Image (cartoon, rainbow, N blue to C red):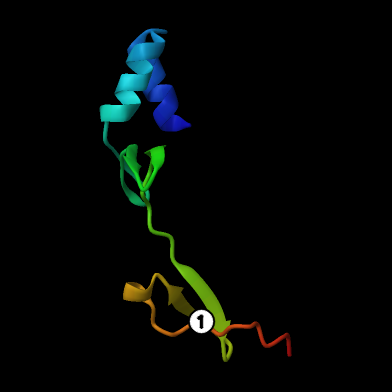
Amino acid sequence: MMIMGQVASQAGGDREKVRQGLKTGKWNGIMGEVAFKDFDGYTNQRKAVMLVEQVQNGRHETVWPPDQAAKKPVWPFPGWK
């Protein structure tokens, strides 16, 4: 929302300028660069990789995406102990 507010204030109320500003701009956020692009059939998305963690043997382990995984996911969920 902060990005939207910034772009809207710079566009002076012009909707097309807002659209264009969001489509072509790049910003630095707390999780790295933010840019809205079209990919994989989706429009105006931020392609961000989110880590999935699973508690295994009492430890938080990254299980996805595969290239950043420390462990393989345990599935199906074995239940609470």
In this rendering, is residue 52 above or below 56? above
Residue drawn at the location 73% of the way across and 85% of the way down? 80
In this rendering, is residue 74 above or below 51? below
Which residue is label 1 attached to? Answer: 73
* Image location of residue 37, percent across then percent down: 32, 38
Residue 26 occupies which quadrant of the picture? top left
> Observer-nearest residue: 64 or 10?
64
* Image location of residue 64, percent across then percent down: 43, 72
Q: 17 left or right of 73?
A: left
Q: How many marks?
A: 1
* Image location of residue 17, percent across then percent down: 33, 14
Q: Residue furthest front?
A: 41
> Observer-nearest residue: 58 or 36?
36
Residue 57 occupies which quadrant of the picture? bottom right
Task: Work out which quarter of the rendered image holds the C terminus and state it.
Answer: bottom right
Say which amino acid is labelled 1: Pro
Residue 62 occupies which quadrant of the picture? bottom left
Q: Neighbour class for label 1 at 10 Å: few (<14), some, many (≥20)?
A: some
Q: Secondary structure at mark 1?
A: loop
In this rendering, is residue 73 above or below 44? below
Residue drawn at the location 39% of the way across and 43% of the way down? 41
Residue drawn at the location 55% of the way across and 85% of the way down? 74
* Image location of residue 48, percent across then percent down: 38, 52
